[in-house]
Amino acid sequence: MTTAIPAAEPSFRDSVDIMFNRAVALMDLSPGLEEKIRVCNATYTVRFGVRLRGRIQTFTGYRSVHSEHMEPVKGGIRYSLGVNQDEVEALAALMTYKCALVEAPFGGSKGGLCIDPREYDEHELELITRRFAYELIKRDMINPAQNVPAPDMGTGEREMAWIADQYKRMNTTDINGVACVTGKPINAGGIQGRTEATGRGVQYALHAFFRDAQGMAKAGLQGTLAGKRVIVQGLGNVGYHAAKFLSEEDDCVITTVIERDGALKNDNGINVEALHQWIAKHDTIKGYPDATLIEDGAELLTAECDILIPAALEGVINLANAHDVKAPLIVEAANGPVTAGADEILREKGVVIIPDMYANAGGVTVSYFEWVKNLSHIRFGRMQRRNEESRHQLLVDELERLSADSGVGWQLSPNFKDKYLRGAGELELVRSGLYDTMVDAYQSMAAIWHNRDDVEDLRTAAYLVSIGKVAASYRAKGL
């Protein structure tokens, strides 16, 4: 699916700057510090050749570092034909603000390779990925102490495993080498819960919002997530997991799924897992039997719903369609899906937007946990889990003894015992840490949103929180 963006629309990079400027106008920063935070520190462009199919093919890639107020810097690597320097620099800036907002101790970075990964087989992609990694590693643009990539659009744990192995081949004595990237497979130094982390973060962001009575009132919503009609644009890793968790665990009704080759609509709800399996098998949503196919999927971005979740590309909600958006609540699961021009229109309409720098921060949060796990060389829960279970067993045994001695005869339910006696493993600890992070970050935004008359929206509040933290870091350095 493609969405035509009007010529007058600001670019993605311009949109980030416009939103940044709107926030800093409400802050007391010196002009020099404001400029230092806004600009991108450096962008490296690499053009490298790989021999494929009997000839040398040349590829163009980028790695941008926006801010080094904290190191290492952090940010994904995406594979897409739309990759360009402006996009990578805009995404790197968003990473700076995102990490600051959720208190992940990283600066912002981003990388991209101008390639359609669907045009190459697995072996060819490995050759391309390793060569791209080699070009970045030898310039310390992949390094566990300086620059730590992660998956993004068009990449996943497979590519991260290749990059980590390439780093270790080139740095054989670096004991922390596996921490040079995050989002790796479990058997290659990854962490449980990372693959679904961004989608899970979207779910937790909505949990936090639905506990905010003032925010709910501003969106004109009531009740719980149960029964809320949801439109999801993009059923990739983020959109799939967000839709799956919201439908299966929170009883939301996924009425519409928009993909590149159209959209599926079913007012009674789409079975997200069944659709995901259909796409994996057929590489298209077409032919899926339990929903109605609409050829022009982009039209359904403006359909009636309670929650709209754009989870794919930037700029899909823009000046061309913003006036027609009917959703009272938009959750930016993708980076930059609402342009600066559309953002202004939607705010005037009273639409509440949960901004990208918060809504999709689950990925970098769990990446932080993975990086810490790699540096500590031990999985979470290994030292305390059995001790925790033993202490819980002592309490349960004592309660049951007291019941028997007193003749009361009551018993703890087996379900309670099973849950209480099970110590937290890595996955439970990751989910707990992510939930805590998303709740704390939302509360920091909401406190500004609800208590300052000059702050109209969550996006501005998010920028104020994050820029304030970045500024404090620079001041602590003596700038």
Image (cartoon, rainbow, N blue to C red):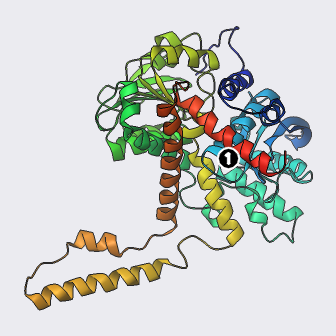
Q: Nearer the viewer, residue 167 or 419?
A: 419
Q: Residues within 10 Å of mark 1 (few under 14, many from 20)?
A: many
Residue 29 location, quadrant: top right
Q: Residue at x 79, y 65 (%)?
A: 177
Q: Which residue is at the far bottom?
A: 405
Please give the residue where the numbered disc 1 appears in the rendered image.
151
Query: Could you say which is closer to the camera, residue 465 or residue 98?
Result: 465
Q: Is residue 129 above or below residue 78?
A: below
- Residue 202 vs 229, above or below: the answer is below
Q: Work out whether residue 74 can be spotted.
A: no
| Quarter location, residue 300 | top left
Q: Give the mark count.
A: 1
- Viewer can see residue 379: yes
Amino acid type of the residue tagged 1 in the rendering: Pro
Check the picture and name the quadrant holding the C terminus.
Answer: top right
Q: Position of residue 284 (x, y in %)?
A: 52, 31
Residue at image location 40% in from the left, 79% down from the top: 389
In the displayed structure, does residue 147 sit left or right of residue 445? right
Of residues 290 and 3, the one nearer the viewer is 3
Relative placement, left or right, of 272 versus 126 is: left
* Residue 204 in the figure: left or right of residue 65: left
> Where the N terminus falls, by quadrant?
top right
- On the rendered structure, is 451 left or right of 31? left
Instruction: Decide: is 23 above or below 277.
Output: above
Residue 326 appears in which quarter of the rendering?
Answer: top left
* Percent coordinates x, y for residue 70 in the rendering: 77, 51
What residue is at 20 percent from the left and 72 percent from the top? 413
Where residue 26 sits: x, y (%)? 65, 27
Q: Percent x, y for residue 31?
A: 81, 29
